[in-house]
Image (spheres, rainbow, N blue to C red):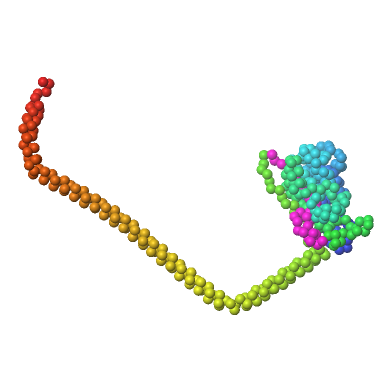
Amino acid sequence: MTDSFPHTPPHRSISPTPRGNSVDDVIAGLIPPHSRVLLVGRQSPDLVAALEGGGCGVECLPPGRGEVKGGGWDVIVHWGIPLEGEPDLNLVRSWLAEGGKLIAAVANASHGARRLGLLLDRLPAPDESRPGAVAYGWRGLTDLLEQRGWTVADAVATVADVLNGLPGPDQEGESLGEAALPFEVVEWVRDQPRARDREFVVVCVPSDPNGGVAPTPIPRPAVDLPRPDDIFARERRQRDAEVKALTDMVQRILETVDHQALLTLDASVGDKAAAATARLAAERARADAVAAAATNTQQLLELRASFGEALKAAKVAMRKEANHRVAAERHRVALQYRSSMSYRLGRAITAPGRLAGRVLRRLLRRRPKGR
């Protein structure tokens, strides 16, 4: 299929859809030959012809009908109608044969043309040749399918430039030219993920309630679409070149200023170096003095500690000497007292009493016990 884009401004890089980049081509390439196929929603004559040419049996379920006779379909194609509507995706699962799959085709709600149309307050009109009336973002689409019990096994995206699909001049002749679309905006939108994915065609299989969660595949482009080299791209390259030239000029100016500053400072470098050397020598001398003072202080502390220990030892020796002298004096006084007349007279008077005491003690020791 090819698309025509009337009223497109002449500077836009719009080209017909290349072969393999239409929803019909993508769906036909995903269905094995000789499959039983049910088309739900939109029925494309080109798709029907391509499938029948591959030996497939094709039946159509127009929009508005929610039931189909029989089942056992190898492939069910869901195209051009909301996934939340009729027929219910849970019912669709029951129509599949064992190992069957669902192919859903929807427009990308985040395509660059829609983003630019929102900025201009002029969204593109739905295209009847595409599933444009049913649009989902990629994350919203995969979340919806997961909630309905489907697992995305494969995904293909038809691709188109972000300017492909924007409306041309309106009835008053207003054109969407460079003034309405600055190149910075167009090029920024082109850089965004999924901005060139126009439609998503996803292959789904029923989710396994006992299985793990498989990673969602990234949509691969249906064809290799080169980035347009249009007026917006040229303006971006020109702007980038101007910015680079200005940056280089500023860098050269800064280098020149730095060189002049170095030459100006070179004359005073010697004096400043000498002053710095003198300050360094003074700081070193002060550091040496502080270190010497610290050494002297340490020596004084050590001397004080040794003097304290010697003082303690002297006190102990003096205490011992004093005790010895007291004992000697007591002994001398005792000897002097015993040699005196008073001591002798007292001993003579008390001698009979002492003798009687000794005799009494002996008699008491010899006395038998119990008497």
Given residues 6 and 237, the one toward you in this image is 237
Residue at far right of view: 172
Residue drawn at 19 percent across, 48 percent down: 326
Query: Is 201 within the magenta?
Result: yes
User: Does residue 4 appear to the left or right of 293 in the view shown?
Assistant: right
Magenta range is 182-209
Q: Residue 85's spot in the image, x, y percent?
A: 82, 40
User: Does residue 86 appear to the left or right of 309 in the view shown?
Assistant: right
Question: Residue 370 appears in which quarter of the rendering?
Answer: top left
Given residues 10 and 180, the one toward you in this image is 180
Residue at far front of view: 342
Question: Residue 164 appears in which quarter of the rendering?
Answer: bottom right
Residue at far top of view: 371
Q: Quadrant of the N terminus?
A: bottom right
User: Does residue 230 appear to the left or right of 315 in the view shown?
Assistant: right
Residue drawn at 78 percent across, 50 percent down: 200
Residue 337 visible in the shown view: yes
Q: Residue 21's spot in the image, x, y percent?
A: 81, 55
Question: Residue 115 appears in which quarter of the rendering?
Answer: bottom right
